[in-house]
Amino acid sequence: MAQYLSKRLLYSLISVLGITLLVFVALNLARDPVELMLPPSASKADMEEMREVMGFNDPVLIQYGRFLKGAVVGDFGQSYNYNEPALDVVLERLPATLKLAAVSLLIATVIGIPAGVVSAVRRGTVSDVLIRVAALLGQCIPGFWLGIMMMLLFSVRLGWLPTSGAESWKSLIMPSVALSVNTAATITRLLRSNMLDVMNKEYIDVAKSKGLGAWMVVMKHAFKNALTSIITVLGMQIANMVGGAIVVETVFGWPGVGRLAVMSITNGDFMVVEAIVFILAVSFVIVNFVVDVLYCVINPRVQLQ
């Protein structure tokens, strides 16, 4: 176990370094930050002096080393647009994104797991066909398009829900639904496939021969053994949800990290973008690490290598 955890931590560290390095280099190539820090009337001599003072003339790897040194202690520099520490800007909006992702994941789980079980148990029936069609549509429909359609129906036409903002719990309904549809569809299809595979195993026939009820066989034996893959998918979908939240938050004007990232990229606020990327990369790595450990705990047959 100790060797496995050490290896996973090493892989995680390499992943974080790789992601942050790529983004750091891309941002440095995209736009000169000095243009944002100085007024348009600044001369070329003033801009060159500012680059020298800020260290922008140093090689990229040296600049990246300074970035990592500051990131370890939570110092990502000063935001150009907000004139405050970049980390404070991100942390101020992080709870809104976490709330949106948590509610979306809850909706996806509550819908996806029962739908997958019912579809597998009632294979070939009308309910199975309807669930499969709905899951296929859920994976095909883009979240931003679904969000726009819901805004037109529930906000513009019916006036039931607000179009944007985060003033009340009603503002959370449409963004969380738009963000959860794809995840719910993925869980449904994967769980159905795994359940069908498990239900053909010999130990399922043995359980039935012992006189166990159909519900007991499904939930205690089939569902439990099909759950391991769902744990992995949920870990991956958490990352996808946070990534998808960038589009959904922009559509609904949700004051989270996703919308902040779009605004910061548009305005060239690289310090905030780098802070967002670093925090999200570390979060993804932690989630995947926890999922790997849970996978082995739930299914002891999996060897830690």
Image (cartoon, rainbow, N blue to C red):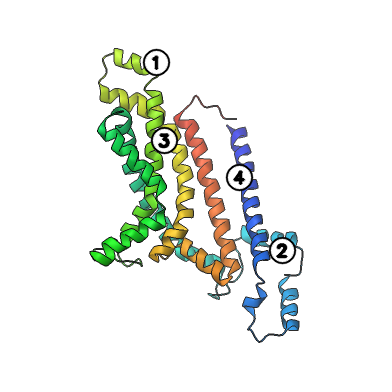
Q: What residue is disc 2 on?
A: 63
Q: Earlier in the sequence, mark 3 or mark 2?
A: 2
Q: Earlier in the sequence, mark 1 or mark 4?
A: 4
Can you give x and y, in whole percent of width and height, for residue 158 in the image? 23, 64
Q: Nearer the viewer, residue 296 or 157?
A: 157
Could you tell me which quadrant the C terminus lies in?
A: top right
Query: Badge 3 is on which residue?
Result: 190
* Direction from residue 27 to residue 135 in the image, left or right: left
Question: As rendered, which of 270 and 145 lies closer to the eye?
Answer: 145
According to the image, label 4 marks what residue?
12
Single out the mark in the foreground, 4 or 3. 3
Kindly identify the amino acid type of the residue bearing the numbered disc 4.
Answer: Ser
Q: Is residue 179 above or below residue 209?
A: below
Q: Nearer the viewer, mark 1 or mark 2?
A: 1
Circle 4 SS class: helix
Mark before the other along the chain sequence, 4 or 3: 4
- Measured Cα–Cα span from mark 1 to mark 2: 60 Å
Q: Dividing the picture into quarters, in which one does residue 215 lie?
A: top left
